[in-house]
Amino acid sequence: MLLAACTDDDEGPNAGPGGTAKYDPSPTSLSIIAGSEQETVLNTVVNSWCTEHRYKCTFTLKGSVDQARLLAAGNADFDAYWFASSVFQQVGDTGSRLQDVKPMFLTPVVFAGWQSEMRKLGFVGKTDVAIGDILTAVESGRTTVWATNPTQSNSGATVLFGFLNYFAGNGPGQALTQQQLESAAVDAGITRFTRAISSTPPSTGTLMKECLDHPDRCKTLFTYEDLVIEKNQELIKAGREPLYTVYPRGSLAISDAPLGFLPHGNASDEGKRKALNELQNYLLTSPDAQAKLLKLGRRPATSIGLTLDNPDTAVFNPAWGIQANLREQGIQFPSSAVITAALNRYQTRYRKPVAAYYCLDGSGSMGGNNGWTGVRDAAHQIFDQDQAALNLLLTHPEDRTTVTVFNSAVTAGSPWQVTGDGAGDLHGLVEKINGYKVTGGTNMYACLLRAAEELGKEDSAKRKRLVIVMSDGQSESRDHDAAVAALGALGVPVIAIAFGSDADPRQLQEVATATGGAFVQQNDLVAALRQAAGYK
C-alpha cells in the first residue's frame, strides 16, 4: 500500500504535473483527493483499511477550492473526491460527474479560543451562546480573530454562509437567496464582520498550525469542532493550555465530509467503484471505524442531529466546551449559483482592501531556470481579471497593487502602481512584465526594503498590507537586516513563492518566517497564487 500524505499544495510520491496524482488504471488502486481536514482520518483510519484489504491507496491533500477547480475543469487524475463539506462539492461538481456521493461524518464549525481568552470574553461555562454574542465579541476589538479565507477554504466559507444567513434573518432551515445576498442589510453586516477578522490563512490545516504556533497573535478562531478536539489532545500532552469551544446558536453550520466516486468510462471503473463503496460502507457502518472516528472527534453521519450515545468525555470533553449532544439544526446552504456569487462578493466587496506589493525577481538566473516564464504566467492569472475570476483571485475596487521588478536593484522603470480594479490598468501590469527581459544579479532585499518604505505610507486601518515575492531565492544578502527589521516593525507579512527549476527555498522561507508570512512552493501555479491570495 502506497500512501501519498501530501500537504495542501505538495506533490506526493505518485504525483504528476501540477501536484496531482498520476491516474493508475489498476482496478485495485484507489487515488483519493481530499481536504487537509481529512489528513488524520486518512492516516489513521483509511490507511490501515487499505492495507488490510490489499488496495493500493494514494492520497493527495488539496484545499476545497483546488478540489472544486480540478473537478470543474474535467481533471481525471483521481478515482474519488473527498470534500470537507457539500458547499464546494456543489461549486465543483456542476456537471454531476461524481457518483455514489455520501457524507462520511459530521462536524460543526465552532468559535474557539485559548481557554483564558474565552474566559475573558465571558464564554467559559456557557452552553447556550447566540451567534449575536459571538458577533459582538468579534467586532468589539477585545480579541484577535482568525478564520480561513472563504474563497480558498471550506471552513471559512462555512462561517461566511452562517453569518450571511444570520444577517438575512433566516432560520436554520431557510437557505440564503440571491435577493437577500444583494440586500443592503446583509451587505453591511457581513462586510463589518469580515473586516473584523485579523488573519485569513488559505487552508484550515494552515490556520490551525499557525494559530497554535503563534498564540500571541491568534487569540480566537473559527474552525471545525473535530480539529479543536485533535489539537487539544496534542496541547494537553505538551502541557499547554487547551482551546475552548462555543457553538453559534441560531446559525450553526455543519460540514458533512462527502466522498464520491469519479468514473473514467473504462474497464477499471467497476473494480474501483467496488473498492470505494466498500470503504464508504466501512466508514459508515463498521463498529471499528466508528470507534476510531469518534476518538478523532468525528460525529457519525447516521446520528440523529448531532447527538451521541454514551460519548467519551475524554474526547468530547466538556472542560473544553465540547457539547456531545447538540440539538441545534444546521443551516441550509444556498444553491451553487448563490454560493459562487457570495464568494465573488467576498473578493470585491466584503473583505478589507489590500495594499499588495509584488517583488518580482528579474535577474539573469530567472531566465535560465524558466522562473521568469512562471512569473509572466502568474501575472496573467492575477492581473487579467477574466482569468482571475475563474480562480477566485479578483481585485477589490479599493485595492492598491504595486509591482516592482528587481535584479541587483529595483529596475525596469518600476515600481508600477494601480489603485482599484480597472481591468485595463491591471492588464497594463501584465504588458509591462511581459516586456521585461531578465538580466543582472539578485538583491531581493533591496525590493523588500523599498516595499517597507512604500507600505509604511499606507493607513493600515484602511488597507491590509502584504508583500508577495516571486523569486528563485538566489539573492545576495545586502539589505537583509534592514528589510526584515522594517517589515517586522510595520507588521507586514511576506508571502514568498519559489519560481524556477533550481529555486533555493532557504532565503524565501527565512524571510517569510521572520515576518509572520508564508512560504509557498510553486508546483501548481494557480494553487500557489491562490494560497498567497488567501492572506488578503
Image (cartoon, rainbow, N blue to C red):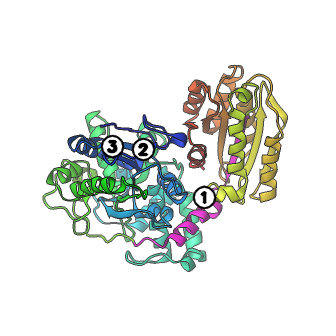
Q: Earlier in the sequence, mark 2 or mark 1?
A: 2
Of callouts 1 and 3, the N-terminal one: 3
User: Is residue 496 in the magenta section?
Assistant: no
Residue on which disc 3 sits:
57
Q: Which residue is mark 1?
A: 351
Q: Identify the residue shown where x is 58% and y is 48%.
A: 530
Amino acid bearing label 2: Thr
Residue at figure coordinates x 60%, y 39% from the top left = 493
The residue beneath circle 2 is: 60
Measure the C-alpha gap from mark 2 to mark 1: 30 Å
User: What residue do we see at 23% from left, 65% from top?
Assistant: 302
**Callout 1: helix, strand or loop?**
loop
Q: Is residue 190 above or below residue 201?
A: below
Image location of residue 279, percent across then percent down = 26, 53
Magenta stretch?
A: 332-360
Q: How far is mark 1 from mark 3, CA to CA? A: 39 Å
Foreground disc of the pair 3, 2: 3
Asked if residue 291 can be seen in this view, the reply is: yes
Residue 122: x %, y % from top left: 36, 57
